[in-house]
Every structure is written in structure tokens, then in C-alpha cells.
Image (spheres, grey):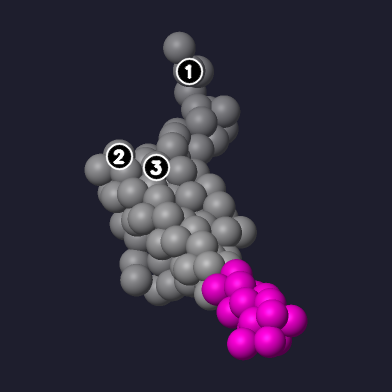
Amino acid sequence: MFEAGDGARAAGARGGQRSGQARRRLTLEDVERDLPTLRTLEDAQKRLDVVSQWALAGLVTGVVCGSVVRACEVWIRAQGEQLDRDRVKVLEGRIAELEGELALRRGT
């Protein structure tokens, strides 16, 4: 139990600050400032880290956190597929070069 006086007031103030932080709502400005645009895998990792911290602090719900995780998963998958398509194009070009060289050697 708290004794009256400065100690109790300080403890109450700390509790009030924590309560206020938990009730604080994120603004669009907060999100735009703190969450990176998804351009690299490092951006996705940072976004996941920030949102998980927000969820643990009670600033976003588990549903919101799960939605961000899903969005990052989809973005990462799309990036991987784009890398695959780019690599296939490079390999197709190389195959065409080799086929051309082979045709020249065969004299056709």
C-alpha cells in the first residue's frame, strides 16, 4: 500500500502516464513518420518491428498487427516472384545467345 506524500504522488503520476500512453491513438502522421515505405526487405523487417512494438504497447490491436504482418508477407512474396521473373528473362537471353552461337558453328 502507498503512503501519503510525494512517493504516492510520483507513483500515481507514473501510472497515469502509462495509462495515457496505452490509450493514445496513432495518427496518420505517426504512421507515415515511423513506418517505412516497402521498397526493400529491410523496410519490411523494420515495419514489422515497429508494428509489433506498437502492439505490445497497446497502441494497435492484434488484428491491426496481423493485417500488417499479412501485408508484408504478400509484399515479400511479390518481390520474390519479381526477382524470379527477372532472372528467367536473363536466362532466356543467355539461352538465345548460346543457340545463336551454336547455329553459327553448325553453319545454319
In the figure, 91 relative to 42: above or below? below
Residue 55, label in figure = 3
Disc 2 element: helix
Image location of residue 14, percent across then percent down: 50, 38
Between marks 3 and 1, how big is the CA–CA gap?
31 Å
**Closest to the observer: 78 or 48?**
78
Front position among marks 3 and 1 = 3
Q: Which quadrant would the N terminus be assigned to in this image?
A: top left
The CA distance from mark 1 to mark 2 is: 34 Å
Q: What's the residue type where badge 1 is placed?
A: Phe
Classify 70 as above or below 56. below
The residue labelled by disc 2 is: 62
Closest to the observer, 10 or 74: 74
Q: Earlier in the sequence, mark 2 or mark 3?
A: 3
Q: Are marks 2 and 3 in contact (CB under 8 Å)?
A: yes
Q: Residue, x 62% and y 77% (percent of image)?
A: 99
Q: Answer with mark 1 or mark 2, whichever residue precedes in sequence.
A: 1
Residues rendered magenta in the picture: 91-108
The chief SS type of the magenta part is helix
On residue 2, which mark appears? Answer: 1
Tell me the residue at 48%/23% (across/down): 4
- In this orientation, which residue lies closer to the viewer: 59 or 83? 83
Looking at the image, which residue is at 51% across and 62% down? 84
